[in-house]
């Protein structure tokens, strides 16, 4: 069994503190889009909010920790609540690759995408150590794990990588989503 967690507890500092999961894309909130899409993969889908964090104030790493502890499955697909175009086939593919890796992470020309990735239970000791040491960067966590990278070429079968992995960190990025909405492939 696999689990899915949507991280929706961030501060959204670059977006003026606004709840990015409530932003509307193509007539639905990003969170509604994600739940509709990803609930087809599992019954163990959770929205992780700040109050769910066991170790509060630790950003996405704290959210990953809460999600891994709550997950019923051995592999967890983790996605940020500001990624409106993530698809179930993409998530299923990443989950399928989990095998011997601690994490399965897309890596494109823009770098790693640790907030659209799969993490196994084997990640918990590294996550807990980093939380205890207050070393909170998700990208740095990857140095402690056996990571299977998924290239842009591999992801291409699911559509345009820029669209699939698009996220909304700023009002300008939200405005630019309109261009991506019509660009399916």
Image (spheres, helix red, strand yellow):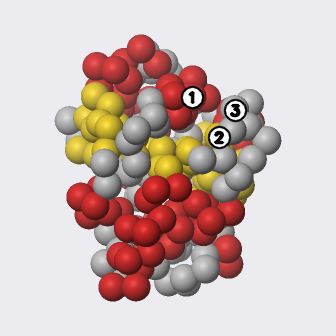
**Of label 2 and label 1, which has the lower sequence position?**
2
Tally of marks: 3
Which residue is identified by label 3? 41
Disc 2 crowd, CA 10 A, few/some/many (<14, 14-19, 20+): many
Mark toward the viewer: 3 or 2: 2
Tell me if residue 118 comes above or below residue 54 in the rendering. Answer: above
Front one among 63 and 8 = 63
Mark 3 and mark 2 in contact? Answer it, CB < 8 Å: yes
| Secondary structure state at the residue bearing disc 3 | loop
- Give how far apart the Cα atoms at labels 3 and 2 are: 8 Å
Which residue is identified by label 1? 92
| Secondary structure state at the residue bearing disc 2 | strand
Query: At x 52% / y 55%, what residue is drawn?
Result: 121
Which residue is identified by label 2? 2
Residue 70: x %, y % from top left: 68, 63
Query: At x 61% / y 61%, what residue is drawn?
Result: 67
**Of label 3 and label 2, which has the lower sequence position?**
2
- Give how far apart the Cα atoms at labels 1 and 3 are: 7 Å
Front one among 129 and 28 = 129
Tell me if residue 176 comes above or below residue 128 in the rendering. Answer: above
Residue 120: x %, y % from top left: 50, 50
- Give how far apart the Cα atoms at labels 2 and 1 are: 9 Å
Mark 1 and mark 3 in contact? Answer it, CB < 8 Å: yes
Query: At x 28% / y 28%, what residue is drawn?
Result: 151
**Of label 1 and label 3, which has the lower sequence position?**
3
Quadrant holding the N terminus: top right
């Amino acid at each position: 069994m696999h689990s899915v967690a949507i991280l929706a507890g961030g501060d959204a500092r670059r977006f003026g503190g606004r709840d990015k999961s409530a932003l509307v894309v193509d007539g639905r909130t990003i969170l509604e889009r994600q739940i509709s899409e990803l609930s087809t993969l599992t019954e163990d889908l959770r929205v992780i909010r700040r109050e769910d964090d066991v170790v509060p104030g630790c950003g996405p790493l704290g959210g990953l920790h809460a999600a891994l502890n709550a997950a019923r499955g051995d592999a967890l697909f983790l996605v940020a609540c500001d990624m409106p175009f993530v698809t179930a086939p993409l998530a299923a593919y990443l989950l399928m690759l989990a095998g011997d890796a601690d994490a399965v992470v897309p890596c494109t020309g823009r770098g790693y995408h640790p907030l659209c990735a799969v993490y196994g239970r084997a990640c918990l000791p590294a996550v807990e150590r980093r939380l205890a040491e207050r070393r909170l960067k998700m990208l740095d966590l990857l140095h402690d794990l056996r990571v299977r990278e998924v290239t842009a070429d591999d992801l291409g079968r699911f559509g345009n990588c820029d669209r699939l992995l698009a996220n909304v960190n700023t009002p300008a990025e939200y405005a630019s989503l309109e261009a991506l909405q019509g660009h399916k492939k």
